[in-house]
Image: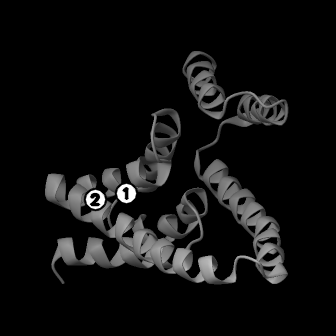
Amino acid sequence: MNILLELFWVFLKVNLLSTSGPASVGLLYHEAVGKFVTEAQFVQAVGFSAVLPGSDALQLAMYVGYAAAGIPGGLVALFASILPPTLIILGVTMILHRLRREAWISSFITGLTPAISVLMIFTAWKIFQKGGAIGWQGWLIGIVCLIAMWLKAPERLVVLIAGIVGVIFLR
């Protein structure tokens, strides 16, 4: 199959089967690692997309697409990532506009929250395990970052500082 068509299909599938940008990272990991990028490239891409401004999922899509097929691959991955949510949100908006007074809609949205949280924890755990043998220093950085996030520090700042600390102490 043509690489651009394969990229389009993978990112279309990832964005149809996941409910949010961060949640799609786990699914994309299974679809892209070994086929389009290596594990090391994927972990680096996740880190860079978390630090850079903008949508993490779209930056990750462009990185994987670019790594697989250059600029055309990045554009195809970006288009395939944008298409499903755009069409779905237009359809859902039209439906919710008609059902906005129904109580079960609010309950449905509330029920999604724990599922997405658990999915993100499992994805973070897999990425942390694949990051390499980092020892107790890596665990310490992770725990300090968790505490900083719990104290509501800006996520991008926490990731950037963790990267700088990693460069300094994990050589």
Disc 1 marks which amino acid?
A: Ala
Circle 2 crowding by C-alpha within 10 Å: few under 14, some 14–19, many from 20: many
Picture quadrant of residue 54: top left
What's the mark number on residue 65?
2
For residue 61, the mark is 1
In this rendered view, identify the residue nearer to me: 23 or 26. Answer: 23
Q: In the picture, which quadrant includes the C terminus?
A: top right
The kind of residue tagged 2 is Gly
x and y, in percent, of residue 106 in the image = 80, 73
Quarter assignment of residue 140: top right
Where disc 1 sits, the SS reads: helix
Is residue 158 shown to the viewer in this render? yes
Q: Position of residue 26 (x, y in %)?
A: 58, 64
2 is higher (above) or lower (below) than 82: below
- Please give left or right for residue 162 compared with residue 109 in the image: left
Question: Would you place residue 101 above or below residue 86 in this image?
Answer: below
Q: CA distance from mark 1 to mark 2?
A: 6 Å
Q: Residue at x 58, y 83 (%)?
A: 95
The answer to whether residue 170 is seen in the rendering is: no
Please report the residue visible at 61 percent of the width from the left and 63 percent of the height from the top: 23
Give the residue displayed 54% in from the left and 70% down from the top: 27
Is the residue marked by circle 1 packed among few (<14), some (14-19), or many (20+) residues within 10 Å?
A: many
